[in-house]
Image (cartoon, rainbow, N blue to C red):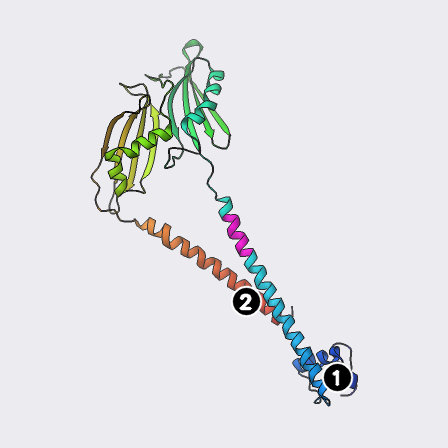
Amino acid sequence: MENEKCAGGCWFWDECCFQTLHGSLCVVLAHRRGYHSPEPRHSHEVFTMKLASMFHETGKKTRILICCIVVVIIVVSAIVVFFVTQKQPSYITAKEGFEKAEPIAKKWNNASNLCIVYPRYISQDGKSEQWVYIFEAPFSKGIRGELTIKIYSNGNVNTEEYYDGNFTPGLNFVPNWTIDSDEAMEIAKKNKTIAEYLSKCPQASIDMCLRPNETYSCVWWFKFDYPVPVGEGSYYAEIRIDGHTGKVLSAKATPVGPVYPTWWRYFECLVLPITIVIIIAVIVVLVIRKVFRWIIGGG
């Protein structure tokens, strides 16, 4: 036994091995690997062995702490990146988009006329990330054309052209209007019929467009819709507003019964977020357990 070497290259039972920090650590490691050494013969040997053991255990705890901190930083960073990328883009009104769409339409055909305006999605303040403008114009030999212009809040523009010899032109066109989309939304929500409806169905979806009808040259048309909790159909409300004066032309709403969240709303608001949190927690626990096993196993 006196000639057997430790993992660090020292002789296990050499007296100098007990009198150095390195030697004491080697003895501790030898004990962990199943070897047995004689009892230390001096008090300074006992102190040195305890000090070496303490340093060894402290190093392990430090590695565990560092790994935990790294895992937490990764998880928090992922969550922050997710919410930053989900930031709502800036929205624009119908008139702000029209300022870019009109020159494009006039360049396409100077005799073009606006037929309809509608958003891809409308916010609660009457703004949208994307507005669609449809123009019509006559061309030679009885051919008429239609130009669809999509204006995005980030500045992007998309256009689509359509031509047809049997094209039926619109009966009326939308002249320059006075009431913008955000103003029209405010007027709609202040209407007594619509306000009462929204008080019972605050999560109703909203559709709107600007178009002509038989009587008025331009009308803001709104439709609010909320699915019936049980069965088919929905609770809806409609309002029409003069695009020049802001006058309410008509407003109506279906009788609204008890409004309960649908199963999808329960899933969307409760089950889905909880499921995501559980999945993230399970992944974090599995990663930490694997890291601990790697540390305890010696890497």
How many angstroms separate mark 1 from mark 2 (CA)?
A: 36 Å
Q: Quadrant of residue 196?
A: top left
Where is residue 1 drawn, in percent x and y? 76, 88
**Relative horizontal placement of residue 68, taking residue 138 as reference (left or right):** right
Q: Is residue 15 left or right of residue 281?
A: right
* Residue 249 falls in image quadrant: top left
- Image quarter hosting the C terminus: bottom right
**Above or below 271: residue 296:** below
Query: Do we see residue 14 in this rendering?
Result: no
Residue 221 image position (x, y, % from top left): 31, 28
Residue drawn where x is 57% and y is 61% of the image: 69
Reading the chain from its start, which is encountered first: label 1 or label 2? Answer: 1
For the record, the magenta segment spans 74-82
Q: Which residue is label 2 attached to? A: 289
Res. 10 image quadrant: bottom right
Residue at x-position 24% and y-position 45%: 231
Question: Which of the pair 98/274 is nearer the observer?
Answer: 98
